Amino acid sequence: MRQSPNIIITGTPGVGKTTHCDSLAERLGLRHVSVNQVVKDRDCHDGWDDDYQSWIVDEDKLLDAIEDEAKQGGCLIDWHACDLFPRSWIDLVVVLRVDSTTLYDRLKARNYAEAKLQENLDSEIMEVLLQEARDAYDEEIVIELTSNTSDEMETNVDRIEAWVKQWMADNN
Ligand code: DAT
């Protein structure tokens, strides 16, 4: 049994996954597992897709690469997809959401090409990641939080911190 929970922080690129995970890792001593980084550093991919400007992820290799850490617990799994992680690994799924105009500005600031920017905006408007999380996990463990402002981020981090403390009290 793990002594700390594993939490997926997911959402469309630009919603604030990295920012939330960094803050939570610092406050709670959980490990920020940036899946993009793992894919790159541990070769969990079949090359680079130029059209999508992203790695072609080998999901089996990725799961093998993070299995030991996940079994140990205390992971903040940061990725724009969530349904590949075994349900038995996961205690909470946080889906971050953001307004279209805010997302547009954030992705524009990252110099996203117009097609990729539009694709991500569409995905956010269509609630693709929220639906994916709800389809893959029990509804009690999926929470949707907005991440438009720093104040909202602070509130989210406080809320997740309270949830983690409660989980620790209930499970240890
Ligand atoms: P992601 O990891 O989901 O791609 P990020 O954490 O890198 O997103 O954030 C993208 C940018 O938006 C970055 O410049 C920080 C900013 N940002 C994220 N969440 C925010 C929030 N709640 N309020 C204000 N700015 C935020």
Image (cartoon, rainbow, N blue to C red):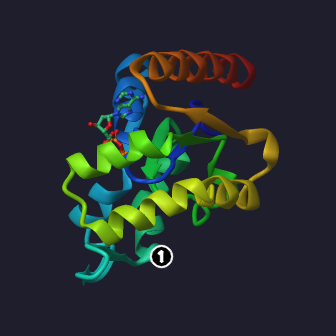
Ligand 1 is found in the corner quadrant, namely top left
Where disc 1 sits, the SS reads helix
The vertical placement of 74 against 42, above or below, is above
The vertical placement of 129 against 14, above or below, is below
Residue annotated with mark 1: 60
Q: Is residue 12 visible?
A: yes
User: In the image shown, does 98 or 38 lie closer to the viewer?
Assistant: 98
Where is residue 69? Give x, y as percent: 44, 48
User: In the image shown, does 105 or 74 lie closer to the viewer?
Assistant: 105
Q: Is mark 1 within 8 Å of ligand 1?
A: no
The answer to whether residue 74 is left or right of residue 16 is right
User: In the image shown, does 135 or 58 lie closer to the viewer?
Assistant: 135
User: In the image shown, does 129 or 70 lie closer to the viewer?
Assistant: 129
Residue at (47, 40) in percent of width and height = 75
Residue at (40, 64) in percent of width and height = 118
Residue at (45, 15) in percent of width and height = 151
Residue type at numbered disc 1: Asp
The answer to whether residue 78 is left or right of residue 53 is right
User: Which quarter of the figure has residue 54?
Assistant: bottom left
Residue at (54, 15) in percent of width and height = 158
Where is residue 157? Give x, y as percent: 50, 21
Mark 1 surroundings: few (<14), some (14-19) or many (≥20) residues within 10 A: few
Where is residue 83? Give x, y as percent: 61, 63
Q: Is residue 81 visible?
A: no
Where is residue 120? Give x, y as percent: 43, 61
